[in-house]
Amino acid sequence: MVSKMSSVVTRSSPPVLVVPSKPTPAGNLPLTSTDKSRLFFSFTSFHVFERQLHEPAETIRRALSEALVHYYPVAGRLAAGANSGDQDVHIACTGEGVAFVSATASCTLQEIRFLRTPLVISMDDLVVRYGGPCEPSDPLVTMQVTEFTCGGYVVGVTWNHGIADAFGLAQFLQAVGEMARGLPSPSVVPVRYDDSFPDIPQLISAMVKRSPAGLEAFNSMTMRMSFAYCDVTIPWSFINRIKEEFRSRNGGRRAACTSFEVVTAAIWQCRTRAINLEPDAPTPIVFSANVRKFVGAKDGYYGNCVISQLVEATSGAVANGAIVDVVSLIKDAKESIPGTLAESREPEVDDELIDALFGYNTLVVTTWGGIGLDKVDFGSGTPARVVPNKEAPDAAICFPCTPCASSDDNGANVVGFCVTDEHVQEFNAELARLR
């Protein structure tokens, strides 16, 4: 058994604020309804770089300052006008800056296994956390660069989801990388506010309207839960076999299923079997989808442009059904996204479904593959791994198909917090059967 290492990371100082390297415009920028539905909670992205970079912390700090000239809203703060409440929250372009920490670790990346499980280092040592819900006075982004004795380094970035989705974060970090590599300006001209596309229907808004007390009860419930961290590889042999079964069953009448659909179906089925609900209990999943191409978002838009797509099924159907049928449920939901956007209406949710969505029955799925997070290059090449993370998971969540060079030859990497400690043994046993 691998034990955790202690006191291997030393931070050079408390967080400092990195401000734009040149004067930037002041003023306020509005947030979309999609932004507002994600205010005040955060995600973290760890980028693990194996190859050496000269003075990585200073190089990235300087590049961050230069990138903030172009992404100056990121250096601002959230603010509310005279009418208080989320509906009046906006970005105040104050230029106050991004929180930044440099650190060193007294070990190699190999010794911490490139952040693979079982973890031998606390992820909290590699990132600046908010310490709870994001507050209006908090920086919109925090960054820590930790250099290891092997010359590799880890960049941990935490951001307020209200200002950007993961696609937007990737665009921003790629711009920082371009500045670090000496480019005079980002190759993509950033756009923070785009009023040309319509409101995107948001599931969470429908849930809160249907059951205003549900969110509070949900938060109270999840505070008492301890979600187990998982980091697994779904073998290509399994993925390719299910793809072939799907193709054979549909006889070419449908587009081929994707690795995301197969991996998500496998996690959904394994989790449902592990938590062992009553057969007729609803066990939905909710997956995030980037809809820029559907709503005509401007090139360079880095605000939130995602929809949370609901897939409904009972525990018995998912746990006992053929895996290709579970894949079909996910594919059907993906294919219905353009219609959902065209109708521009919030999903309809009844009381039973609300109880499931505000509870442990539901799995939230968001993929960080193929959105550019693995293309970030500060001058030493792209990362060996990208690891999504949440400070305090408030729901069962997984990130299928995350970029991971060390497992790409063997299968698709999945990280997340899929089950509580109570069900982790059964969940791992189900995953082990995927061949």
Image (cartoon, rainbow, N blue to C red):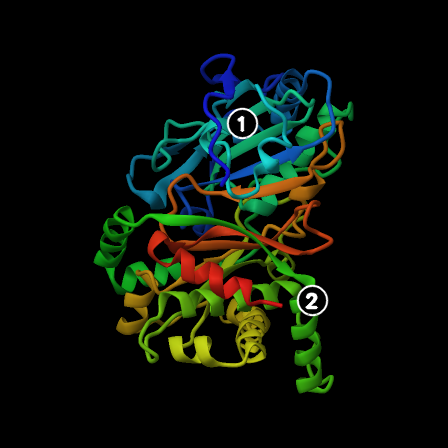
Q: Is residue 189 above or below residue 94?
A: below
- Residue corresponding to mark 2: 237
**Picture quadrant of residue 331:** bottom right
Horizontal placement of 170 versus 52: left or right?
left
User: Residue 140: x, y in percent?
Assistant: 47, 32
Label whose residue precedes the other's in the sequence (2 or 1): 1
The residue located at (64%, 29%) in the rendering is: 70
Q: How far across and how far down the image is residue 285, in percent?
A: 44, 66
Question: What's the amino acid at mark 2?
Answer: Ser
Write down the quadrant of residue 265 in the picture. bottom right
Single out the residue that lies furthest toward the front: 1
Residue at disc 1, secondary structure:
strand
Q: Would you say 427 lies left or right of 153 here?
A: left
Closer to us: 274 or 332: 274
Q: Judging from the image, what secondary structure is the residue with disc 2 in? A: helix
Q: Is residue 279 above or below residue 412?
A: below
User: Of the numbered discs in the image, which one, if any, rests on residue 195?
Assistant: none
Provide the residue designation for mark 1.
143
Give the Cα distance between marks 2 and 1.
38 Å
Numbered label tally: 2
- Judged from this view, the residue extending furthest toward the top is 13
Q: Is residue 263 visible?
A: yes
Quadrant assignment, res 314: bottom left
Q: Is residue 176 left or right of residue 322?
A: right
Quadrant, the C terminus: bottom right
